Image (cartoon, rainbow, N blue to C red):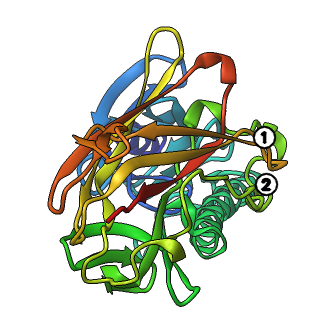
């Protein structure tokens, strides 16, 4: 009888068994290409496998005994102690997570008669680690939402600024004879009409209704300094009312009353601005007489805004036109015949100092 029992025990240890299972992450998803290593009780490596696309692994021809299963993926590791006695071990789950080691000192139970695997010995990631991971994810999500809302708020502030200060995007200020003012960009002009792009769309304006066109330009290097801490919420003070420049010519009411025959000087294109090595600023441009009479002593008056308190400086540039000698013997080279064009140039010396922006008016005389 002793011999029979010895033969049965010896046959049990001589039998080969199979070990299989899956490697999972903390969310329960299968991990592919993870390395699974099997160690014996002497800490010697018996076999190793790489998980397939479904995260599965399998060891065959394993003898009965105590073993250690170790799963590695990048820097993540999970360990599991198992004990093979009389049947295969299937359905093992090794769960690995960031900076955690899933380890169990309990023996992997044997399969029951219904061939259900015993996974009670699998030590999953601690609950507090899972909670910390979830909190970290929620914080990142909230941070992204805050960044998105901040971006939308900046867009709304930029759009509202356009309505408060149209000059932030449109530099042309067109004053009409009915007292209204249009802020926009001139996209087309001829001798009779102007086409202006505005906040509400395009407007076509009759030139006969235009009293004055003012170009408002902000010098980039002379913008007011705003501390970084309040830069996003800061809005500049309203533009001060400029002192009315004094002109040596007669007012427009004293000119020839007939609009059909009166001279009419308009700006062609835009005023160019450049600065030389001595920090002198030069304004250049071209004007045209679109009226029906000669214009004499044609000039462009510039009003420079020196600061936000309203201090201004007025400079004048005469237009280079044709020569004309009056009966009194006075000769001018700033006359423009109907349909003629002339250029002007104004040099702003550096000793005047910096200025925030400028406006201009075109003035001329009319003689019979």
- Classify mark 1: residues with Cα within 10 Å, few (<14), some (14-19) or many (20+): few
Tell me if I can see residue 59 in this picture.
no
> In the rendered image, which quarter contains the C terminus?
bottom left
State how far apart marks 1 and 2 are (Cα). 8 Å
Q: Quadrant of residue 78?
A: top right
The residue lying toward the viewer, choosing from 172 and 32, is 172
Residue 293 drawn at (x, y percent): 24, 67
| SS at mark 1 in the image | loop
| SS at mark 2 in the image | loop
The residue lying toward the viewer, choosing from 195 and 335, is 335
Q: In the displayed structure, would residue 105 be above or below residue 43?
A: below
Relative to 182, 132 lies left or right = right
The residue lying toward the viewer, choosing from 184 and 317, is 317
Q: What residue is rendered at 75% in x and 55% in y?
A: 243
Relative to 19, 80 lies left or right = right
Q: What residue is rendered at 56% in x and 36% in y?
A: 220
Residue 130 drawn at (x, y percent): 69, 57
Q: Earlier in the sequence, mark 1 or mark 2?
A: 1
Residue 94 drawn at (x, y percent): 50, 49
Tell me if I can see residue 249 in this picture.
yes
Q: Quadrant of residue 205?
A: bottom left
Give me the disc on residue 226.
1
| Residue to which mark 2 is pinned | 234
- The answer to whether the residue labelled 1 contacts the one labelled 2, judged by CB atoms less than 8 Å apart, is yes
Give me the disc on residue 146.
none
Relative to 291, 146 lies left or right = right
Residue 251 drawn at (x, y percent): 56, 67
Q: What residue is rendered at 52% in x and 39% in y?
A: 316
Q: Quadrant of residue 260?
A: bottom left
Q: What residue is rendered at 63% in x and 74% in y?
A: 160
């Amino acid at each position: 009888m002793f011999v029979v029992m010895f033969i049965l025990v010896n046959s049990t240890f001589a039998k080969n068994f199979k070990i299989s299972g899956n490697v999972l992450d903390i969310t329960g998803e299968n991990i592919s290409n993870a390395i699974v290593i099997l160690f014996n009780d002497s800490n010697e490596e018996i076999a190793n496998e790489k998980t397939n696309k479904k995260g599965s692994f399998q060891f065959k021809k394993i003898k009965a005994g105590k073993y250690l299963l170790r799963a590695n993926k990048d820097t993540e590791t999970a360990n599991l102690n198992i004990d093979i006695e009389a049947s295969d071990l299937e359905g093992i789950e090794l769960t690995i997570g960031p900076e955690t080691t899933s380890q169990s000192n309990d023996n992997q139970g044997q399969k029951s008669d219904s061939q259900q695997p015993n996974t009670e010995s699998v030590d999953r990631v601690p609950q507090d680690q899972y909670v910390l991971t979830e909190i970290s994810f929620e914080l990142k999500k909230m941070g992204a939402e805050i960044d998105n809302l901040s971006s939308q708020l900046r867009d709304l502030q930029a759009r509202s600024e356009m309505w408060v200060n149209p000059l932030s995007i449109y530099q042309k200020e067109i004053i009409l004879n009915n007292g209204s003012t249009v802020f926009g960009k001139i996209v087309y002009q001829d001798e009779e009409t102007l086409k202006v792009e505005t906040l509400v769309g395009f407007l076509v304006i009759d030139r006969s209704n235009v009293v004055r066109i003012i170009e408002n330009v902000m010098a980039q290097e002379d913008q007011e300094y705003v501390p970084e801490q309040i830069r996003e919420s800061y809005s500049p003070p309203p533009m001060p009312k400029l002192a009315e420049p004094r002109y040596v010519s007669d007012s427009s009411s004293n000119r020839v009353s007939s609009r059909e025959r009166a001279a009419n000087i308009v700006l062609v294109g835009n005023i160019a601005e450049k600065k030389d090595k001595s920090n002198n600023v030069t304004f250049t441009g071209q004007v045209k007489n679109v009226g029906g009479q000669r214009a004499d002593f044609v000039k462009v008056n510039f009003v420079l805004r020196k600061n936000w308190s309203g201090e201004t400086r007025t400079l004048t540039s005469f237009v280079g036109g044709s020569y004309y000698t009056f009966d009194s013997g006075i000769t001018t080279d700033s006359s423009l015949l109907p349909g003629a064009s002339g250029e002007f140039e104004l040099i702003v010396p550096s000793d005047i100092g910096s200025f925030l922006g400028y406006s201009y008016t075109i003035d001329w005389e009319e003689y019979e």
